[in-house]
Image: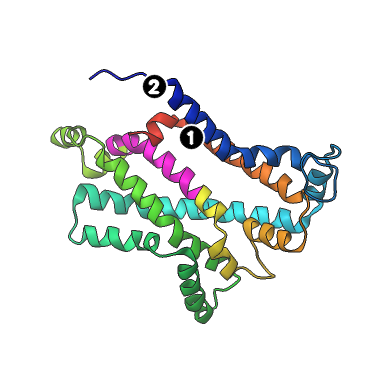
Amino acid sequence: MEDRPISPALKIAAFVMFAFLLAPVLLVVPISFSADSYMSFPPSGWSLRWYVELMDNSRMIGALGTSTLLAVIVMVLAMVIALPAAYAIVRMRVIGGEALLALFTAPLLLPTIVLGLAILIVFAGAGLLATFPGLVIAHLIIVLPYALRVLTTSLSGLPIIMEEAASTLGASPLTVFRRITLPMMMPGMVATAALSFLVSFDEAVISLFLTGPRITTLPVALYQHVENQADPLVAAVSVLLIVLTLAVVLIVDRTAGLTKTFVK
């Protein structure tokens, strides 16, 4: 079946939609270099004032460090839990595998605010409110369904014949997994790691229920800052987050390729 050429009208419509979606993001960049004391477009002058303010804002820098460390830990834990679970469900076909998958992905069915309230009630009795371990557990509950879904999809699309061939040649199950399955799953694992990091780093609703004066994440710190004042400092932080996201996408592209990672 031959591919039909894309019509010019469809290309124009797609361009307009992309421009509409990206316009707010593009406006953030010039606002972050504003010399004004409030957010306005176009700025009356240009300055690096708000980037300097950001570097001097210990609360924002501390929240950025907390969010980064939290996202890295949650990403690693999600991979450690989701990888064997996905392998057991897809390849080993363990008894109750479908129930296990449903259990891990159940948080996706609940509104985030309802899940956050439930976590708040449980964590209040366990003494995990406003603690780093509590944030790790809560973010893991949110991230794990995404990680498991991506890994099961990636593993389901791999040809099992190569693993069977290695087994018939005398390779042990562990050797087959380490030398055959893992290399073939690498694009899916890179995608899982990137998605897990970004979901945890960007999580705001659950974090609002669990953070406090002792510990806070960057999305919560931004939310609280906007409540008190609307200055271009928020735009400066937003630009840094855009750069971080682009860096993650670039790393995925350089290590595994975007097409292999996200397109099946």
Instruction: Name the image quarter holding the N terminus.
Output: top left
Q: Whole-percent x and y of residue 130?
A: 61, 71
Residue at image position (43%, 27%) is 10
Asked whether residue 243 is in view, the answer is: no
In this view, 167 is above or below 79: above
Q: Which residue is mark 1?
A: 252
Instruction: Name the image quarter holding the C terminus.
Output: top left
The answer to which of marks 1 and 2 sits earlier in the sequence is 2
Residue at image position (80%, 46%) is 50
In this view, 249 is above or below 196: above
Q: Whole-percent x and y of residue 137?
A: 48, 64
In the image shown, does 5 or 82 lie closer to the viewer? 5
How are the colours assigned in the image? rainbow
In the image shown, does 225 or 141 lie closer to the viewer? 225
Q: Amino acid at mark 2?
A: Ile
Q: Amino acid at mark 1?
A: Val
Residue 193 falls within the magenta-colored stretch: yes
Instruction: Specify the segment rendered in magenta.
Output: 179-197
Residue at image position (25%, 39%) is 176
Q: Secondary structure at mark 1?
A: helix
Measure the alpha-carbon separation of dots 1 and 2.
28 Å
In this view, 76 is above or below 103: above
Q: Is residue 24 left or right of residue 261?
A: right
Asked whether residue 255 is in view, the answer is: yes
Residue at image position (34%, 50%) is 149
Q: Which residue is mark 2?
A: 6
